[in-house]
């Protein structure tokens, strides 16, 4: 059974960089076949896709966040990470990591495993 | 960006009855549509992918239909554990990917 677990600071000051890590257990990131993603949910709101990474390091980002987002992978630790720079109160949200299968065409499909989510509050 | 619109925003249904939730895409997403269930304080749970394929372990009372721009999630006989928020998501926008979710439908007990 694949499990994902987010970790990182729950409080970040405005203008600083939000950093989160997702640790994957029950399966290897480097086995391929999946995109590893970050998705966030503002309090009481809907879901927003942030970006994906493949084990090779290929990344895809939401254009609305692209200038501030970096997703990286550490296959030796079976982890992938999110950095979001220049945060404001609008970045306060629950951040989820998730896994998406890759289709025969190489595109990402639905997210079948999710972490429990971690609330990040941006405040001074 | 493909905009996903769900209706209604809130649906009140009695246990044992059928619930029908709708999702509309601003342009065709083929069958690249998923449905998720989210309960308070929990992560979303994948119910349906490919518009109509149930994910592993999902009860048969959940069914999905549609293609192109119009999609439906039907719960045939509501159980107490089904009252939650439901989201649709398109994953057709590729390349580059720009996956978008609907705003959600809250299914509440009538």
Image (tube, coloured by chain):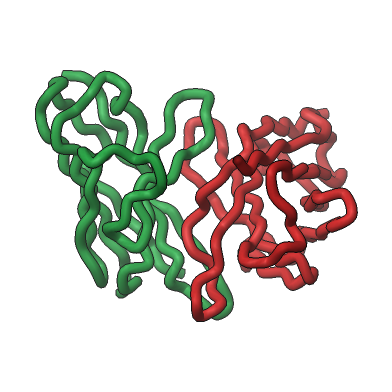
Chain colours: A red, B green
Q: Give coordinates of residue A118: x percent, y percent.
A: 68, 32
Question: From the viewer's perspective, is A58 left or right of B45?
Answer: right
Q: Is residue B30 above or below residue A29?
A: below
Q: Give coordinates of residue A29: x percent, y percent.
A: 74, 57
Which quadrant of the rendered structure holds the C terminus of chain A? top right
Give the residue at x 46% y 24%: B40
A96 or B100: which is nearer to us? A96
Q: Give coordinates of residue B52: x percent, y percent.
A: 27, 58
Q: Is residue B66 above or below residue A3?
A: below
Q: Is residue A81 visible?
A: yes
Q: Is residue B103 visible?
A: no
The quarter of the picture where residue A49 lies is bottom right
Give the residue at x 77% y 46%: A87
Question: From the viewer's perspective, is B43 left or right of A16?
Answer: left
Which quadrant of the rendered structure holds the N terminus of chain A? top right
Give the residue at x 53% y 73%: A107
Q: How many marks?
A: 0
Give the residue at x 23% y 58%: B71
Question: From the viewer's perspective, is A106 left or right of A72?
Answer: left
Q: Give coordinates of residue A4: x percent, y percent.
A: 67, 40
Q: Is residue B106 above or below residue B87?
A: above
The quarter of the picture where residue A10 lies is top right
């Amino acid at each position: 059974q694949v499990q994902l677990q987010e970790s990182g600071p729950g409080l970040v000051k405005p203008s600083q960089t939000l950093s989160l890590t997702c640790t994957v257990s029950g399966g290897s990131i480097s086995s391929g076949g999946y995109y590893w993603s970050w998705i966030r949910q503002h309090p009481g709101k809907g879901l927003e896709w942030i970006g994906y990474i493949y084990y090779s390091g290929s990344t895809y980002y939401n254009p609305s966040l692209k200038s501030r987002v970096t997703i990286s992978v550490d296959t030796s630790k079976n982890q992938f990470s999110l950095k979001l720079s220049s945060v404001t109160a609008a970045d306060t949200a629950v951040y989820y990591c998730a896994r998406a299968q890759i289709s025969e065409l190489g595109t990402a499909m639905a997210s079948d495993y999710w972490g429990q989510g971690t609330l990040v509050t941006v405040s001074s | 960006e493909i905009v996903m619109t769900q209706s209604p925003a809130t649906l009140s249904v009695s246990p044992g009855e059928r619930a029908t939730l709708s999702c509309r895409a601003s342009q065709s997403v083929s069958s690249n549509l998923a449905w998720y269930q989210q309960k308070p304080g929990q992560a979303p749970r994948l119910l349906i992918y490919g518009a109509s394929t149930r994910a592993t372990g999902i009860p048969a009372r959940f069914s999905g239909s549609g293609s192109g721009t119009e999609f439906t999630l039907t719960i045939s006989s509501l159980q107490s554990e089904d009252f939650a928020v439901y989201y649709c998501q398109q994953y057709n926008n590729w390349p580059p990917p720009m996956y978008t979710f609907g705003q959600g439908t809250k299914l509440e007990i009538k």
